[in-house]
Image (cartoon, rainbow, N blue to C red):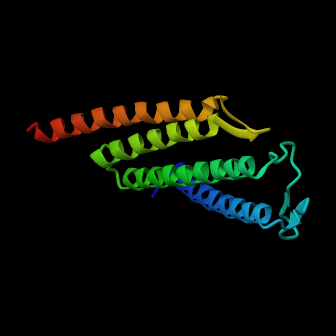
Amino acid sequence: MDNKILKLSYWVARFLQVAYAVMILFSLYFLMMVFLDLPRPASMKLTSWLSLDLTGSEALPQGQFNILVFFLKIIAKNILLILALESLIKCFGSIKTYRAFQETNTYQFKRIGKLLVYCFIIVSLDLSYEEENFRIGFSPELTYLLLGLLSLVIAEVFKEGNRLREENELTI
């Protein structure tokens, strides 16, 4: 792999996958803390250079249902982002070997687009249960939608590039 930007992008994507996996583990840990009625610390000192502030500007929702929905949304979003990053890493691999315009890249970019649209839906839906009223709200987080649509457009570009490559291979 000669391209330094491609190499850097690969390692950044791998790092983000690990970060999202750690966030899933922390979410599961805090979910267990809530449902087992364990005391919640205000912060955690993980190492001398890494600490986690749990107070944050956004407080945890009140009520077990709301907390469950809050953490399940975080976990689902992070799983979808890990899968999208894995597809992106597969694309990096084919670009590295100079096989960018393959049907597999078209599939991977479509997959990334769909996963990001699913993230948009999950993050934008607000479910809550307060005072015996179930509420469903929608507050769109457009970043995921725009990135998903961009990935679908890139998939079409790769599809056309693949068609042109195949046509070129058939030309004598």
Q: Residue at x 38, y 36 (%)?
A: 155
Q: Quadrant of the C terminus?
A: top left
Q: Position of residue 41 (x, y in %)?
A: 90, 63
Residue 100 visible to an observer of this rendering? no
Point out residue 139 in the picture as x, y percentages from the top left corner: 67, 29
* Residue at the image position 82 percent from the left and 46 percent from the top: 62
| Rendering coords of residue 126 (x, y %) | 67, 36
Task: Please tell me which residue lies in front, 101 or 145.
Answer: 145
The residue lying toward the viewer, choosing from 71 and 86, is 71
Give the quarter of the image for residue 159.
Answer: top left
Q: Quadrant of residue 49?
A: bottom right
Tag count: 0
- Is 148 placed left or right of 161 in the picture? right
**Left of 137 or right of it: where is 62?**
right
Q: Is residue 141 above or below residue 41?
A: above
Q: Residue furthest bottom?
A: 47
- Residue shown at 64%/47% (left/top)? 73
Residue 82, image x and y in percent? 55, 54
* Residue 137 appears in the picture as rendered: yes
Up the image or down, 124 lies above or below 13; here it is above
Task: Using the image as rendered, state which of residue 47 and residue 72 is in the foreground.
Answer: 72
Direction from residue 123 to residue 10 in the image, left or right: left
In the rendered image, the residue lying farthest to the right is 42
In which quadrant of the rendered image does the N terminus lie? Answer: bottom left
Task: Using the image as rendered, state which of residue 116 and residue 3 is in the foreground.
Answer: 116
Location of residue 57 with respect to 42 vertically, above or below: above
Residue at the front extreme of this rendering: 132
